[in-house]
Every structure is written in C-alpha cells, then in structure tokens.
Amino acid sequence: MVTERWPSSCLAALAISLFGLSACSSFDPVHETHFTLLYQDTYDALGMPGAHWVAYDEQHSASAACTNGAAGNHLPKECSDVYAPWTEWTNPKCPPSAQELSEGYLADPGANGSICIQGVLRPTLACAKDHRPAQCFEANGLDVSNMWGAGVGLSFSQSGKQAWSAPAHKVRGVAFDFSGSEETRLNLRVEVPILLDPESRVSSDRPLMRSDGSVLGTDGNV
C-alpha cells in the first residue's frame, strides 16, 4: 500500500464580491464590483459573528465517514489525515466529539495572510465487507463515498449550521487564491453549502448533500 504525503496546500483569505454604485458623468450610474476580505475584522460587519477557519479530513469530521462503522468502517491508519499546523490528532474509530473537532480550528489569517494545511493522502480502498450499500457507493470497486481526502474551509457562524443570507448583505459571490502540488490542484473540489427551501424541487443533474453528510449523486446513488 502506497502512502503519499502532500506538501502544504495554501488558501488565501477569502474575499466576497459586493454590489457597488458609482456615478459616471451625468449618465446612468455604472455598477462596479467591490471586494471585502473575510477575516476577523470584517466578520461582524457582514453578519458573521463567530466565523472561523477549520481543517478537516475523512476521519476528523462530523461524520468521520472513513472510520465510522456505519459508513466506511476502515481502520484509522487506512484513512487520509491532516497533521499540520497542529500536533497530530488521535485517531479513534468513532466520530470525534465537538471538543475534538475544535482542535481543527485554524488561526485567522488576517488581512494579508493565508491558510496552509499538510497531511497524508492514502489510497482509496474497496468498501468494507458486509457494508451498507446506502452508505458506501463503489466506483471501479473502490469506496468513493467515504474516502475523499481532506479540506479547509471558512464557517460563516460559530456552530457552522446557521444559515447566512448573502442578498441581505448585498453579496453576490466569493473568491479565493489557491496554491499546492499538481496532484492536489487536479483533485481540488470547491463546495459552497446552501440551505434549500423544503418545498423546492432539486434538479436531478446536480449532486445533493443530505443532512447526515452523505451525498446523492446524479445517478441517485449515495
């Protein structure tokens, strides 16, 4: 079994795109795009009290999918692991507690900083024997549901579960700069979770994450 270490991957502080307005001579106003960096000095003004950066991996997340007995049920040593910038986490089989997950909180980058993580990316294995089909979807005989690597993100609230309204703060998008190894860049996935109206219909041509953390693919499989 080959274990690969990836060099530090860095994400520059996120910026949000704001609606702006400026006059141009005596003609109609010209809309301009303005950016505000997201860091500790701007969170409150944008209605994000308690916002914070966090790192996570497939065994140190709310669902601990890789090691969770109801999901991947793999051994901790078989799962990818983020180990920097903090000391190495313990690797229990069960999902980590809220206190353990808080170990993944990252220092705020400030106006000119960046967020960097390092870790070990381990190869994708087959689903464990006697696995639950709804919790372990295999592609080419491999467990692609629960072995997905690691990530870093900005939680817009203290709990990470409180919805935030972009239109209410005249925000139209987010932007960031990323640097890392070629393999990391080729396997990069960007997610922006949104809260759906319970009455709205979801297009079948888009993947959908459910409340338990599992994702329904466009083929209907988990």
Image (tube, rainbow, N blue to C red):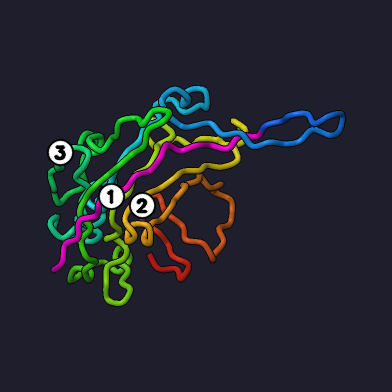
Q: Tell me which amino acid carries mark 2.
A: Gly
Q: Residue at x 54, y 65 (%)?
A: 204
Q: Is residue 16 magenta?
A: yes
Q: Residue at x 31, y 66 (%)?
A: 144
- Find disc 3 in the rendering and name its residue: 87
User: In the rendered structure, which disc, 3 or 2, sits on the residue that comes first in sequence?
Assistant: 3
Report whether residue 16 is seen: yes
Q: How many C-alpha atoms fall within 10 Å of the one at disc 1: few (<14), some, or many (≥20)?
A: some
Query: Where is residue 161 shown, x and y percent of the image?
Result: 41, 38
Query: Where is residue 171 shown, x and y percent of the image?
Result: 59, 36
184 in relation to 141, above or below = above
In the image, is 87 to the left or to the right of 175? Answer: left
- Find disc 2 in the rendering and name its residue: 213
Task: Report helix, strand or loop for mark 1.
Answer: loop
In the image, is 180 to the left or to the right of 111? Answer: left
Which dot marks residue 63? 1
Task: Report helix, strand or loop for mark 2.
Answer: loop
Q: Tell me which amino acid carries mark 3.
A: Thr
In the image, is 12 to the left or to the right of 173? Answer: left
Q: What stretch is highlighted in magenta?
A: 1-19
